[in-house]
């Protein structure tokens, strides 16, 4: 049973730009505000009990337009 979980978001330079402690068990949802991030590509990791859950690593691309 997991004791702790975090969602971490990194820039393509490897700088951690966001961290969210996840509370509760089972499935969940995290909503990110686009105002938190500049336009660009980010890498996110789900970290459970200090270990990155490799199957959930992925890329997130944020595109900003003047209408946003």
Image (tube, helix red, strand yellow):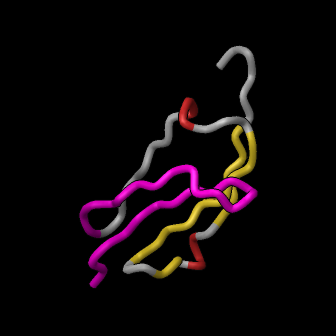
Residue 23, located in which quarter of the rendered image? Answer: bottom left
- Residue under the image location 49 percent in, 41 percent down: 32
Can residue 60 be found in the magenta stretch?
Answer: no
Q: Position of residue 10 (x, y in %)?
A: 62, 57
What x and y, as percent, mark residue 66? 73, 16
Which residue is the extreme one toward the top?
67
Image position, residue 17 (x, y; %): 57, 50
Percent x, y for residue 18? 51, 51
Residue most extreme to the bottom: 1
Dividing the image into 4 quarters, which one contains the N terminus?
bottom left
**Magenta-colored span:** 1-25
Quadrant containing the C terminus is top right
Q: Is residue 55 left or right of residue 28?
A: right
In the displayed structure, would residue 62 be above or below residue 46?
above
In this rendering, the answer to whether 35 lies above or below 28 is above
Name above or below for residue 31 compared with residue 52.
above
Horizontally, is 12 left or right of 21 in the view? right
**Does the magenta run of residues contain 15?**
yes
């Amino acid at each position: 049973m997991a004791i702790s979980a975090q969602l971490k978001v990194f820039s393509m330079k490897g700088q951690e730009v966001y961290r969210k402690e996840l509370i509760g068990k089972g499935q969940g949802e995290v909503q990110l505000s686009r105002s938190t991030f500049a336009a660009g590509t980010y890498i996110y990791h789900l970290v459970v009990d200090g270990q990155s859950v490799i199957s959930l690593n992925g890329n997130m691309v944020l595109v900003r337009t003047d209408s946003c």
